[in-house]
Amino acid sequence: MLRRKKVNKLNSIIGVKSYIFFFMIFNFTGIVVSQEIDYGKISELEVGESITLKNDDRKDKLKYLGSILDDRGTTKFHIVTVFSTVQASRTVHGHSQVIFLGKDYQFLENYELGLPEELPKRIENNALVFEFNNSKGESIEFKFIVGEDIPKLLCVSPNDCY
């Protein structure tokens, strides 16, 4: 009995360490990939326009949502949504991100979302506009106001923040 407890404890420790390792690889990879994309191409796009970038086993669809302005009407941030698909052996993995770029299109922040449906649809009056379904299945718009600073959390609905 004592030997079995030790083996189970060892297995659970190995499982936790493996989970932490893979979690770190997944998160850090997402951030690095976000910074590798050439965001200078965004400056050539109109609001709402998309471009697709492909390489080897990865495809990124970037959509320029527009800019967030400060009180003087000067661009503070450019907002880009990215939906990436990555071929991993036999399956394809999707990643949804909201990217904040500086006024000169330099990378500032990345928010990795759970689903492509959670990406914002547009910008209205310095607010990212999201659509979600309420408990009755009705489509509801949610506006997340972006202030002067990059938000610590990005909320895609009243009860769902990243």
Image (cartoon, rainbow, N blue to C red):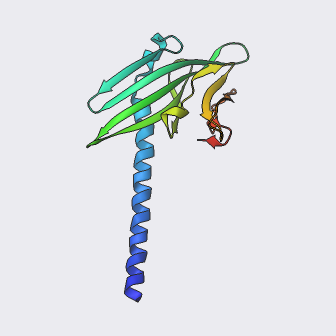
Specify whether 65 is left or right of 155. Answer: left
Query: Number of labelled discs?
Result: 0
Residue 95, given in percent of the width and then of the height, sits at 43, 36
Q: Is residue 13 above or below residue 59?
A: below
Residue 99, given in percent of the width and then of the height, sits at 52, 29
Q: Is residue 17 above or below residue 113?
A: below
Give whichever of 52, 150 is nearer the camera.
52
Quadrant in the picture for residue 3: bottom left
Give whichever of 27, 157 is nearer the camera.
157
Quadrant in the picture for residue 76: top right
Give whichever of 9, 147 is nearer the camera.
9
Q: Residue furthest bottom?
A: 1
Q: Residue at x 44, y 30 (%)?
A: 83
Residue 90, given in percent of the width and then of the height, sits at 26, 43
Q: Residue at x 43, y 70 (%)?
A: 12
Q: Quadrant of the N terminus?
A: bottom left
Give whichever of 132, 81 is nearer the camera.
132
Q: Residue at x 66, y 13 (%)?
A: 74
Q: Residue at x 43, y 43 (%)?
A: 28
Quadrant in the picture for residue 61: top left
Q: Residue furthest right?
A: 71
Residue 102, given in percent of the width and then of the height, sits at 56, 22
Q: Is residue 3 above or below residue 14?
A: below
Q: Quadrant of the C terminus?
A: top right
Q: Residue furthest front?
A: 136
Q: Is residue 46 above or below residue 7?
A: above
